[in-house]
Image (cartoon, helix red, strand yellow):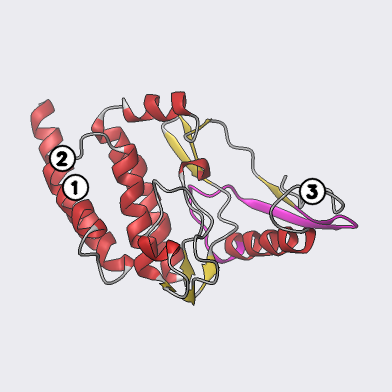
């Protein structure tokens, strides 16, 4: 379950109304896109303390935890690529529905090492449609953020999603195979024009890499 917390609690950065707004965004996102990496949102209960979002439970380890992240990075390359394929496929669906990345980092990822299953959660700061950076330094982890997420007034759009997803792969895949490395390098230097362009390049590189890994293991 997700709640906005105690309405009287002044410790969080956002006030209660701001926290409620994020829950409304989370519910809208869950209702607009269905994907196996996303826990199913069963219901939203309206309470005196704001909405309560009731999701499926998912087992696994949070990849923001250093031990879990290093365990994930030590997996066979093919297994890491399968998880990243799922993450990229999810963002293709989100991109098609008009969602733009916001505050994405490894704290949004759970990996079930027994079932080899990735879960993506806490996308509350995703934004429906392009917008402008109104903060300067936006919410997020430095390891994942695009340059425009540090620049007041900069456009935040599908190119931002592409950059952040490329950085995610660079963080989680310690030794990218050559075809994958080339795509991620382009995504974080000259940049792709949109997320779909990154996704298509990723699919080609991932397929080529999978064939190479399969041939090597025969």
Please name the residue that numbered disc 1 is placed on: 180
Q: Residues within 10 Å of mark 3 (few under 14, many from 20)?
A: some
Q: Quadrant of residue 14?
A: bottom right
Q: Which residue is rendered at x = 27% and y = 72% of the image?
A: 193
Q: Do the numbered discs 2 and 1 sit on residues whose CB atoms are within 8 Å? A: yes
Alpha carbons under labels 2 and 3: distance apart: 44 Å
Residue 159 in view (yes/no): yes
Which tag, 1 or 3, sits closer to the chain's start? 3
Quadrant in which the N terminus is drawn: top right
Helix or strand or loop: what does disc 3 sit on? loop
Q: Do the numbered discs 1 and 3 sit on residues whose CB atoms are within 8 Å? A: no
Q: Is residue 30 left or right of residue 106?
A: right
Asked if residue 187 is positioned above or below residue 176 in the image, the reply reads: below
Q: Which residue is rendered at x = 12% and y = 44% of the image?
A: 178
Residue 114 in view (yes/no): no
Q: Position of residue 159 (x, y in %)?
A: 34, 68
Q: Quadrant of residue 46?
A: bottom right
Q: Which residue is rendered at x = 80% and y = 51% of the image?
A: 10
Give the camera-side residue of 181 and 214: 181
Q: Position of residue 104 (x, y in %)?
A: 48, 52
Asked if residue 16 is positioned above or below residue 214 in the image, the reply reads: below
Alpha carbons under labels 1 and 3: distance apart: 41 Å
Which mark lies nearer to you, 1 or 3?
A: 3
Q: Which of the numbered marks, if any, corresponds to residue 177?
A: 2
Please name the residue that numbered disc 3 is placed on: 5
- The residue stretch that appears in magenta: 31-52
Q: Residues within 10 Å of mark 2 (few under 14, many from 20)?
A: some
Q: Quadrant of residue 127?
A: bottom right
Q: Position of residue 3 (x, y in %)?
A: 76, 50
Q: Is residue 71 left or right of residue 187?
A: right
């Amino acid at each position: 379950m997700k709640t906005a917390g105690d309405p009287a609690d002044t410790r969080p950065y956002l006030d209660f109304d701001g926290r409620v707004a994020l829950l409304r965004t989370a519910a809208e996102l869950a209702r607009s896109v269905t994907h196996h990496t996303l826990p199913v949102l069963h219901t939203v209960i309206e309470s005196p303390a704001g909405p309560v979002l009731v999701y499926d439970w998912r087992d696994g380890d949070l990849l923001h935890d250093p031990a879990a992240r290093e365990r994930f990075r030590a997996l066979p390359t093919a297994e890491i690529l399968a998880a990243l394929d799922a993450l990229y496929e999810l963002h293709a669906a989100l991109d098609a529905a008009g969602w733009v990345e916001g505050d994405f980092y490894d704290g949004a990822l759970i990996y079930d090492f027994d079932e080899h299953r990735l879960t993506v959660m806490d996308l509350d700061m995703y934004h429906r449609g392009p917008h402008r950076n109104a903060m300067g330094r936006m919410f997020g982890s430095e390891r994942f953020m695009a340059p425009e997420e540090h620049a007041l007034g900069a456009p935040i759009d599908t190119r931002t999603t592409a950059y952040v997803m490329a950085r995610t792969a660079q963080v989680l895949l310690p030794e990218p195979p050559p075809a994958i490395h080339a795509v991620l390098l382009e995504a974080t230097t000259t940049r792709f024009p949109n997320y779909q362009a990154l996704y298509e390049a990723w699919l080609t590189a991932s397929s080529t890499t999978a064939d190479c890994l399969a041939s090597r293991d025969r």
